[in-house]
Amino acid sequence: MLGIIADDFTGATDIATMLRRSGHRVAVVNEDGTLSSEQLAALDAVVVALKSRSGSQADAVAASLDALGRLQAWGAARFYVKYCSTFDSTDEGNIGPVLDAITEELGAQSCVVVPSLPANHRTVYNGHLFVGAELLENSSMRHHPLTPMTRSRVADLLRPQTSHPVGEVLRGTVRQGPAALRSAINAAEARYVVVDAIDDEDLAIIGAATADDVLVSGGSGLALGIPGPGRTDASWAPPPRGRGAVLCGSVSSATLAQIAHAARTQPVSKVDIHAAIADPGAVAAELAAWVLAQPADATPVVCAARDRSDVLPRVGDVETAPVVERVLTQTAALLLADSTVSGLIVAGGETSGAVVRGLNVQFLQIGTELAPGVCWSSAEAQGRTVALALKSGNFGDNDLFTSAWEHLA
């Protein structure tokens, strides 16, 4: 079995979606989730979803080692540390410290570093990470409130986070095939080796070259290069269709465009952040009541912002992101307490993690892919099976919030 440690919930469902493409039977569990012997027997891969991307270094390492131990106890023999395709981190971590801890625990001599996700226009060329046609440092990630990315060479991003050598293998070597790439990785004599990849064929070569490695790391793209069992029984049946809603904590450009698209045909309500700071529970109750008051065939959208002018990182001394997460988590619980609501789309990695934890979801069965890195999943919440789609802020086409529901019909 393949065991994956993901640094947030949307990253976990992202990589699970990629593994499902190659016929893996895959599930996502949270950091406290458990699996029965019957569940394990029906799986080829398990993803443990953490909240370690922007937390403290010590907490990230401890949670990752705990996840590794549980995956080993469940029978995993190969492991994958999954982080964001834009390598979201600071000079202090958390990617490097987590990799250091996992490689030491496994006794791994080397580990490839492959952030690339070509399907979502994240590529590494000549060691530099690109978002579309722009270097990472020139993309919107330069202004990320928690992990501003002001450099683009992946080795330069990783080196301050680890005491181990970091090498590089460029695309010319990758294109020579798995044997040549394997030789280059060995010759690098580095604990971590950043490998170029600009398309899925590159990922397949990397996957073949590292097939015997006990540990790999990267964004979700590398999962496409891992040979899968090709099972035809990796199917998924959605729960019965009922009412649905969209909860957006993300204020990324992609999510704002998706909100704008949905607003053409669907009702949209924005979280009143000042009221939420004063009484998050009351605001959540108002929002849930508003959603349920809409026509039954509508898919209302509740969001933190509708455009950039709405974004308020702080109000006085209060950080607004945790307040929004609290409101949307309580809104989700109130909505799913109504038996007519059967599905939610949640946008934003931190928001998704907060909602899943707030609903006490232990296990996500991965279902239909909606876009690269975005899928429907089924989960037990409020005593019944519901559909959840957890979306990274930057993922999905503009029509995602309206088109996703067609897959639940």
Image: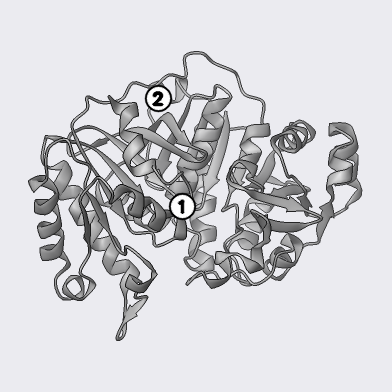
Cα distance between the residues tagged 2 and 1:
22 Å
Describe the element under mark 2 as helix, strand or loop.
helix
Residue at image position (42%, 36%) is 375
- The x, y position of residue 101, in whole percent, is 63, 56
- Location of residue 319 with respect to 328 vertically, above or below: below
Identify the residue at image location x=48%, y=58%. Answer: 52
Q: Name the residue under label 1.
A: 8
Mark 2 is surrounded, within 10 Å at the Cα level, by few (under 14), some (14 to 19) or many (20 or more) other residues, namely few
For the residues labelled 2 and 1, say whether their Cβ atoms are less than 8 Å apart: no
**Observer-nearest residue: 211 or 326?**
326
Please state if 233 lies on the left or on the right of 188 as rendered: left
Left or right of residue 214: residue 331: left
The structure residue drawn at horizontal position 88% and vertical position 32%, both measured from the top left corner, is 179
The furthest residue to the top: 232
Q: Which amino acid does label 2 sit on?
A: Gln
The percent coordinates of residue 129 (x first, y second) are: 70, 57
Mark whose residue sits in front, 2 or 1: 1
Tell me the kind of residue under disc 1: Asp
Please report whichever mark, 2 or 1, sits nearer to the chain's N-terminal start: 1
> Which of the labelled discs sits on residue 39, or is there none?
2
Residue nearest the observer in this picture, 208 or 261:
261
Instruction: Tell me if residue 134 comes above or below residue 196 in the rendering.
Output: below
Task: Point out the residue furthest to the front here.
Answer: 264
Asked if one can make out residue 370 in the rendered structure from this viewpoint, the answer is: yes
